Image (tube, helix red, strand yellow):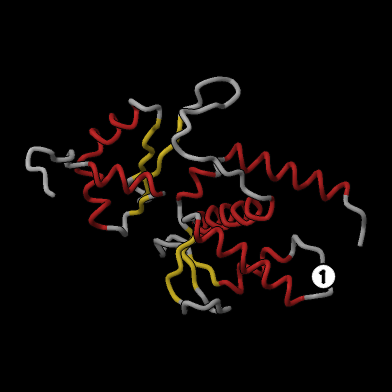
Amino acid sequence: MIVQDRKPAPWAKTVVRLLKGPLFDDEEEAWNQLQLHKVAVSQYFEQIGVELIADNKDGYAYLKQWELDEKGNTIGLMQRRPLSYEITLLCVILRKWLEEFELNDTTSKHCYITRRGLRTELETFFREKANRMKLIRELNRYINEVEDLGYLKKVRGEVQVDDEDTFEVRRILKARFDDDVLHQFLEQLKAENDHAEPV
């Protein structure tokens, strides 16, 4: 039954969309609605301890919960899932890849990489395994998980996994993995390598 006197705010759909995950400018209708109602949407989230992060230049927006105390507690609106070592490693590789692209390529707007190329980059951090097919399946799974997180967007490829799948590296990585996070992880990686036994 339609209740005539009850109408949600004009920015309600934008709020719901942001609660589902990062929003990008290639979702034209939702992105335009955000631009139209950004102030109201931001004020709504601030009331519940959540900040709207929006970057018009790089075309992304996402929600960030305020930390309410020194222990990092939040309002608890969104579940915080710690990333595995492998997924964090892949995100850091992509972050550095994006950084080098922006420094060296001034002709293209977007940074692309194939599944095969990404797997090659990632594989150097794993010790050679006897079962190579198993390793490839694991690396493909990591790539798919990062795609699900919104840091990669498949722009060419079949539904099935294929070596020639091409991905756009999303610039939201720069916000999620800022210089401090990047430096901290690289230091951790260096320490682990220094203590690793030679193969």
Badge 1 is on which residue?
129
> 157 or 73: nearer the eye?
73
Q: Image point 55% across, 44% down: which residue?
A: 177
Q: In this view, does 11 lie above or below 110?
A: above
Q: In this view, does 17 lie above or below 141?
A: above
Describe residue 70's horizontal placement relative to residue 68 as left or right: right
Residue 159 x %, y %: 47, 77
Q: Image point 66% across, 65% down: which residue?
A: 121
Q: Image point 81% across, 47% down: which residue?
A: 192
Q: Image point 54% across, 79% down: which residue?
A: 164
Q: Is residue 87 above or below residue 54?
A: below
Q: What residue type is labelled 1?
A: Lys
Describe residue 19's horizontal placement relative to residue 144 as left or right: left
Instruction: Give the residue at the far right of this rendering.
Output: 198
Instruction: Give the residue at the far left of this rendering.
Output: 4
Instruction: Give the residue at the far front of this rendering.
Output: 1
Q: Quadrant of residue 28?
A: bottom left
| Quadrant of the drawing holding the C terminus | bottom right
Residue 36 x %, y %: 19, 43
Describe residue 83's horizontal placement relative to residue 78 as left or right: right
Q: Is residue 120 above or below residue 32?
A: below
> 60 or 76: nearer the eye?
76
User: Alpha-carbon neighbours of circle 1 within 10 Å: few (<14), some, or many (≥20)?
Assistant: few
> 71 or 175: nearer the eye?
71
> Label 1's element?
loop
Instruction: Give the residue at the far top of this rendering.
Output: 69
Total marks shown come to: 1
Describe residue 69's horizontal placement relative to residue 40 as left or right: right
Residue 105 x %, y %: 48, 61
